[in-house]
Image (cartoon, helix red, strand yellow):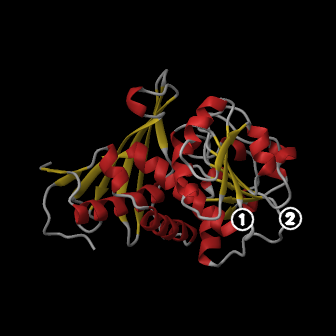
Amino acid sequence: MIDTAVSGVLVLDRDQTRAALPPDALLAAVRTALIAVSRGETSAPPRVAARSSHGLLGAMPGYVPRLGLAAKLVTVFSAVTAGGHGAHRGIVAYFDEENGRPLAVMDAETITALRTAATATAAMTALARADARHIAVIGTGTQARAQIGLVAAMDSARLLVGARDRAAAERLVAGVPAARACGIEEAVRQADVVFCCTSSREPVLRWSWLGDGVHLSSVGGSDGPEFGDDTLRASSLFVEWRGAVTEPPPAGAWELQGADPVAARLIGAVLDGADPGRGSAEELTLFKSTGHAALDVAAASVAYRVARERGLGLNVDL
């Protein structure tokens, strides 16, 4: 419940936004949002974008009952900027759903990375085999770091970080227990679960590298496909929303253009118990994430509540 007695707009920088997103609370909110999407309870028009010669500016407004109202403005540029920032930068604005008052502005790069990692993790817990232990994260950028942070907190997980740049992968696993760096093919062949977190414009893995019963989550590929048609044909497909198939990029997924929308099952329905999810131990399950405004609402709701509780951020009059 929002405290209506608090006035002003709370501004959270990157570190404060991260500090206000504890993993358990974020995972719970993301699950709530995904279930709401599957039930048709949310309001979130397809993402739109203005493009320049160097990148794009996307806009993603959304409403989720019990979580609130928010909008994200985010740029996606291929160049990684100074100061440790990745390719996604911008702001998320959070509003009072009852009177429309702006409540907070926070860092979109952090919101995007952590809510995406939480979504992929929620999909993994719903779809991976119960005995899955070896987890591969493919990539070394902002999204890969966020995913590694969540996976590393799982006590029984053994983590492989696969990358073309072995030195970058070595830096990522430094100090992470039970983790090691390797090449992409080696990581995928040994994994029970694979997270693709890259900015690749072409597939980073082959279907032949995936063992029986593997779960694959693809959360990257803003500018091209992370996996090929053969992987899609061999898999049971799960998505956040059906627009991942029916909408063109940047709202929909590059990998799913032309796919059968009927074959795409909603991950929220699995979390809700309406869809059984995995059908057998040998089945290859595939979760393709395109991002959804409901997930930004989920993360913003947690960040605002926790920041107020902990006294984080700067209060300003707007």
- Rendered residue at 74%/42% (across/down): 227
Residue 71 is at least partly visible in this image: yes
- Percent from the top left, x then y, of residue 31? 52, 68
From the viewer's perspective, is residue 86 above or below residue 251?
above
Closest to the observer, 46 or 279 = 279
Residue beneath label 2, please? 282
From the viewer's perspective, is residue 197 above or below residue 301?
above
Residue beneath label 1, please? 128
- Percent from the top left, x then y, of residue 99? 22, 65
Q: Is residue 302 left or right of residue 253?
A: left
Disc 2 on helix, strand or loop?
loop
Q: Amino acid at mark 2?
A: Glu
Q: Is residue 262 left or right of residue 80?
A: right
Q: Residues within 10 Å of mark 2 (few under 14, many from 20)?
A: few
Closest to the observer, 38 or 113 = 113
- Percent from the top left, x then y, of residue 218? 66, 48
Q: Residues within 10 Å of mark 1 (few under 14, many from 20)?
A: many
- Rendered residue at 46%/24% (across/down): 52
User: Can you tell which quarter of the image residue 201 is in?
Assistant: top right
- Rendered residue at 33%/57% (across/down): 20
- Rendered residue at 12%/50% (across/down): 317
Disc 1 on helix, strand or loop?
loop
User: Can you tell which quarter of the image residue 304 is in?
Assistant: bottom left
